Image (spheres, grey):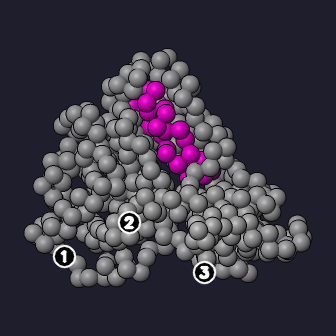
Amino acid sequence: MLLFTPGPTPVPESVRLAMATPTLHHRTPEFEAIFAETRALLFNLLATDEVIMLASTGTGAMEAAVTNLCHDTLLSINSGKFGERFGKIALASGLKNVEIKHEWDTPASVEEVLEAVKANPSIDAVAIQVSESAGGLRHPVEEIAAAVKAVNPSIMIIADGITAVGVEYVDIANIDCLIAGSQKALMLPPGLSILGLSYAAIEKVGDGKGYYFNLASEIKKQKQNTTAYTAATTLIIGLRAVLQESEASGGFGVLYAATARRAKATRFALEALGLHSYPDTPARSMTTIDDENAQEIRDLLKTEFAVNVAGGQDHLKGKIFRINQMGLIPTYEMVWVVNAVELALAKLGRREFDGTASRVFNEEYFKSSLKKEEK
Ligand SMILES: *Cc1c(COP(=O)(O)O)cnc(C)c1O
């Protein structure tokens, strides 16, 4: 069965093997050396002033970011389940929350965020997804961050890049906290989250808030290549392998370019079948289709064509399906996925099978590179 859900994503074999080594004690020079190497590689990936690794899923990093960087009112953007979560975290932490809410296909606009910030002077942090995985959309995070900073540079910008870091270039110029997670774009099992912080964020953290998710304690320890509590040693070894392998194969830029091309070819192939791309601004991390037969298509993909794609949650249950684009995806697998969707549509009597999907994918993905080789 091909795993094509936007998290968890498949773990490359070399990474699984790297994690099969005997367990190391975390308070040893041996592990500290591994931690230092992983930290250095993470600085290359995130390009932020500080990086912190936490033994938690992505939601833990979201909570750490909110509780340490927001001291009064959080403005959160809810265009899906993960944006909604930021607001819930703020309220659960005794903070105030102002929410901008949209349908899951609609990104936030710079104007409405500025309006909210100007109308509520107590807002001291803005939290938003780079790629909102619920409906597969891309928010204009960089533009929003720049506009908010121009109005009030002390407002912290928290960007959830769990399905963006490692998928596409994120400009951190105006971002104070960029979050990543292990089981999505970073091709690892779940349980490790990462925060990239700006110097301004470190200043705002001060003595930190809370206990386990106190970022002041972690910043202090991680600068010394250790962690406040037991490190997720095996996952950090896996992360080092992922990052080393990526640097050896030309860096993340190569992966970003391949991902962008593949995501576009997938969308074109499915649109050529008459299917509709759900989000107004599709993220590169996944291809999301809304369709009245979404559930039947997913079932056929799984039972007849050995492809596991994700459905929708909450009110989009049974109404969309989401095809992962994160990680090292062999292109031939994606050709099979779009072909399988076309076969499923034929089985449902929706359209006659004529090989359109794989033809369009091949034209879009490979034709340009063939032309280059001819020259
Ligand atoms: C998966 C996801 C999360 C939550 O991460 P967990 O590891 O499930 O806690 C947060 N934000 C986005 C955009 C995600 O895709």
Say what amino acid the circle numbered 1 marks: Leu
Q: What residue sits 53% from the left and 38% below the top?
A: 140
**In-front residue for pair 297/249:** 249
To which residue does mark 1 refer?
24
Mark 1 residue element: loop
Q: Is residue 87 visible?
A: no
To which residue does mark 2 refer?
250
Say what amino acid the circle numbered 3 marks: Met
Please give the range of residues in magenta. 124-148
Assess disc 2: are there few (<14), some (14-19) or many (≥20) residues with their C-alpha within 10 Å of its C-alpha.
Answer: few
Farthest residue, direction left: 29
To which residue does mark 3 refer?
1
For marks 2 and 3, give the one nearer the viewer.
2
Decide whether residue 67 is among the magenta residues.
no
Q: Earlier in the sequence, mark 3 or mark 1?
A: 3
For marks 2 and 1, give the one nearer the viewer.
2
Residue 121 quadrant: top left
Residue 303: give its label: none
Say what amino acid the circle numbered 2 marks: Gly
Q: In the rendered image, which quarter contains the N terminus?
A: bottom right
Q: Taking 343 as reference, is 29 left or right?
A: left
